[in-house]
Amino acid sequence: MTDGTKELNKRAEEWAAAELEGDTASLGEILTDDFVGVGPRGFTLGREQWLQRHETGSLRYECFGLDEVQIRRYGDAAVEVCRQTAEGVYEDENGRYELNEQFRATLVFVRQRGRWRLAGLQLSPILGRP
């Protein structure tokens, strides 16, 4: 891995650790102000909505990890495709949902304020082979 790739990989791991811990202070630093996350069923969440799930305790992870990481850099932007594994619970006014999922995740990073920040995320469920 090149130094830039190592730095990006470290940043993605910091994001994963912050998600696992529900660490909104770290997530707030990692996510860009205009961050958009696209969930596995096509819904979108802006930065504040993304953080709010942790602030309210609606989303709690027991396990959250990334592997099968592939990173491509384009100057001050980078695309990371990986497998995300997550276990936990999501609760809202519609009910309680147990999470035990694997997703193919596409993370879009941009270099801002001298650091890599997460500008976008797309999750697709891994259902099997084509």
Image (cartoon, rainbow, N blue to C red):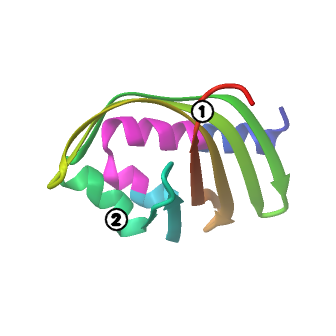
- Indicate whether residue 23 is drawn in magenta: yes
Q: Is residue 6 left or right of residue 49?
A: right
Say the numbered circle drawn on residue 49: 2
> How many numbered discs sit on the rendered protein?
2
Quadrant showing the N terminus: top right
Q: Is residue 18 left or right of residue 116?
A: left
Q: Residue furthest bottom?
A: 34
Local packing at callout 2 (Cα closer than 10 Å; few below 14, some 14-19, many 20+) is: few
Closer to the N terminus: mark 2 or mark 1? 2
Q: CA distance from mark 2 to mark 1?
A: 24 Å
Say the numbered circle drawn on residue 25: none
- Indicate whether residue 94 is drawn in magenta: no
Local packing at callout 1 (Cα closer than 10 Å; few below 14, some 14-19, many 20+) is: some
Give, as a single range, the part of the protein colored magenta.
12-27
Circle 1 SS class: loop
Q: Amino acid at mark 2?
A: Gln
The answer to whether residue 121 is seen in the rendering is yes
Q: Amino acid at mark 1?
A: Ile
Q: Is residue 58 left or right of residue 68?
A: left
User: Which of the 4 quarters of the picture holds residue 100?
Assistant: top left
Quadrant showing the C terminus: top right
Magenta-drawn stretch, dominant element (helix, strand or loop): helix
Say whether marks 2 and 1 touch (CB < 8 Å): no
* Of residues 26 and 124, the one drawn nearer to the viewer in this rendering: 124
Residue 88 in the image, given as x and y percentages of width and height: 31, 31
Above or below 120: residue 68 = above
Q: Residue at x 45, y 61 (%)?
A: 43
Circle 2 SS class: helix
Residue 125 in the image, given as x and y percentages of width and height: 56, 38
Say the numbered circle drawn on residue 126: 1
Residue 80 in the image, given as x and y percentages of width and height: 71, 45
